Amino acid sequence: MNDETYVWGTGRRKCAIAQVRLFLGSGGIVVNDKPYEELFPRLEHRRVIEAPFVATDTVGKFRVAVKVKGGGVGGQAGAIRHGIARALVKEDELFKPMLRKEGLLTRDARIKERKKYGLKRARKAPQYTKR
């Protein structure tokens, strides 16, 4: 991989979809043309995003450009993590067992349950009245 080329990965979590590009070389993580610290002020979300690099011991070796849309902040962080993990596997197949062991390659299939008629939400029923 030279400076102009990149590997990509698509990550999904809840309703969020992230298109991740990994470039070789040091550099930060840019999400929607902004530094990721700006969009993800909580340390918990930053740790989620950096998890694939920590698992594969490649912190600071890649420059990351991400386009993410849909969902909330937590879902977007999970989608970015999933996309980075998939891109790392495309970069080097030896990362796959490490990422699989950490559970970073598995798509988290939990999504919001649909609302049912007669109920207030998916499972919350109106209060029962005896009389």
Image: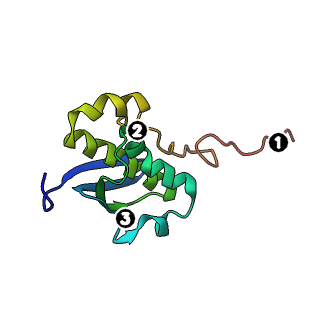
Q: Earlier in the sequence, mark 2 or mark 1?
A: 2
Question: Counting other residues with Cα less than 10 Å from the Cα at mark 2, is it few (<14), some (14-19), or many (20 or more)?
Answer: some
The residue type indicated by label 1 comes to Thr
Contact between labelled residues 1 and 3, with CB atoms less than 8 Å apart: no
Question: Relative to residue 34, is residue 98 depicted above or below?
Answer: above
- For the residues marked 2 and 3, what is the alpha-carbon distance in whole angstroms? 21 Å
In this view, the mark in front (2 or 1): 2
Q: Give 130 or 11, whichever is nearer the viewer.
A: 11
Q: Quadrant of the C terminus?
A: top right
Question: Relative to residue 68, is residue 101 depicted above or below?
Answer: above
The residue type indicated by label 3 comes to Val
Label placed on residue 129 = 1
Q: Is mark 1 on a helix, strand or loop?
A: loop
Q: Mark 2 points at which residue?
A: 55
Q: Mark 3 points at which residue?
A: 31
Q: Is mark 2 on a helix, strand or loop?
A: helix
In this view, the mark in front (3 or 1): 3
Label placed on residue 116 = none
Query: Within the image, what quadrant is residue 58 found in?
Result: top left
